[in-house]
Amino acid sequence: MTDVRIRNVDDWVVELHRNRAKLERRSLESELRQIITQAALAKKQTLAAELHAGVEALRAKYGTFSDSTIGIREERDTR
């Protein structure tokens, strides 16, 4: 992991996160790490939800196709 230092953060911002960390029974560092991680994952989670909705829309429109793996294996084994 990499160490990161953030300078010139307003006191009220630090105090807000310190209080939030205290309520969650964790350190300020742990609280800030979680906030940064959640922010980084937010875009990925949004994209995953959009892709899932797209797949569901296709499934609703065209239905579900059967798995062709068995047929392909049978065909290959006859050679």
Image (cartoon, rainbow, N blue to C red):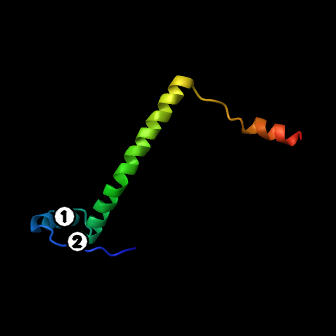
Q: Which mark is residue 17?
A: 1
Q: Nearer the viewer, residue 15 or 62?
A: 62
Within 10 Å of disc 2 (Cα), the crowding (few <14, some 14-19, many 20+) is few
- Which residue shows up at 79% across the image and 41% down it? 73
The residue at the point 83 percent across, 41 percent down is 76
Point 41% across, 44% down: residue: 47
State how many labels appear: 2
Q: Is residue 22 left or right of residue 50?
A: left
Front-lying residue, 14 or 25:
14
Residue closer to the observer: 32 or 40: 40
Amino acid type of the residue that numbered disc 1 sits on in the rendered structure: His
The relative height of residue 8 versus residue 71 in the rendered view (above or below) is below
Taking 51 as reference, is 10 left or right?
A: left
User: Circle 1: is it few (<14), some (14-19), or many (20+) Cα within 10 Å?
Assistant: some
Image coords of residue 12 (percent x, y): 10, 65
- Of marks 2 and 1, the one in the foreground: 2
Classify the position of the C terminus by image quarter.
top right
Tag 2, which secondary structure? Answer: loop
Disc number for residue 54? none
- CA separation, marks 2 and 1? 14 Å
Q: Mark 2 and mark 1 in contact? Answer it, CB < 8 Å.
A: no
According to the picture, the residue beneath numbered tag 2 turns out to be 6
Asked if residue 10 lies left or right of residue 56, the reply is left
Q: Which badge, 2 or 1, is on the more N-terminal residue? A: 2
Q: Of the residues shown, which amino acid type is indicated by label 2?
A: Ile
- Residue 17 point in image, percent of width and height: 19, 64
Q: Is residue 58 above or below residue 1?
A: above
Quadrant of the image occupied by residue 2? bottom left
